[in-house]
Amino acid sequence: MAYPAPVKPASLKPVVWMGDSLVVLRAFPKAVQEEIGYALHKAQLGEKHERAKPLKGFGSGVLEVVSDHRGDTFRAVYTVRLAGKVYVLHAFQKKSTRGIATPKSELGLVQQRLKRAMELHAQQED
């Protein structure tokens, strides 16, 4: 009897955690951690999770995963804009129960961390 050769898993892009994003994500409820973790795993494979959407104002390379859990909303923002790596820029719980817009303070932090990620990436490319 012949068996097919084992399929090599696709190489995973490394994840780079910016700021306190990993610490914050680990404080989220387990179900939220799993959903966001799976979305990041898909990004490592070069795929996009169904809950990952471009973050408004940042272009298609910066994505936001929104996870709802028991009436609370949790978000993680990452970029695949920088070749070969997935940079997790920010993770936070949305405080306001009104509207779906991301607060300006959170967007400012995403912008700062994206800039820093681009600097780090450029240094590693040299």
Image: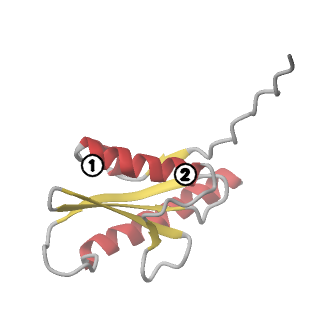
- Residue at horizontal 47 percent and vertical 63 percent from the top: 50
Q: 37 or 70: nearer the eye?
A: 70
Image location of residue 65, percent across then percent down = 39, 62
User: Which secondary structure lies at badge 1?
Assistant: helix
Mark 1, other Cα within 10 Å: few <14 / some 14–19 / many ≥20: some
Residue at the spot of label 1: 24
- Residue at horizontal 55 percent and vertical 61 percent from the top: 48
Q: Which quadrant: the C terminus?
A: bottom right
- Residue at horizontal 14 percent and vertical 62 percent from the top: 71
Q: Which quadrant: the N terminus?
A: top right
Mark 2, other Cα within 10 Å: few <14 / some 14–19 / many ≥20: some
The residue type indicated by label 1 comes to Val
Q: Left or right of 58: which side holds 8?
A: right
The numbered mark, 2 or 1, whose residue comes first in the sequence reads 1
Image location of residue 30, percent across then percent down = 26, 41
Q: Left or right of 3: which side holds 81?
A: left
Residue at the spot of label 2: 42
Q: CA distance from mark 2 to mark 1?
A: 20 Å
Q: Is residue 104 above or below residue 46?
A: below
Q: Residue furthest top?
A: 1
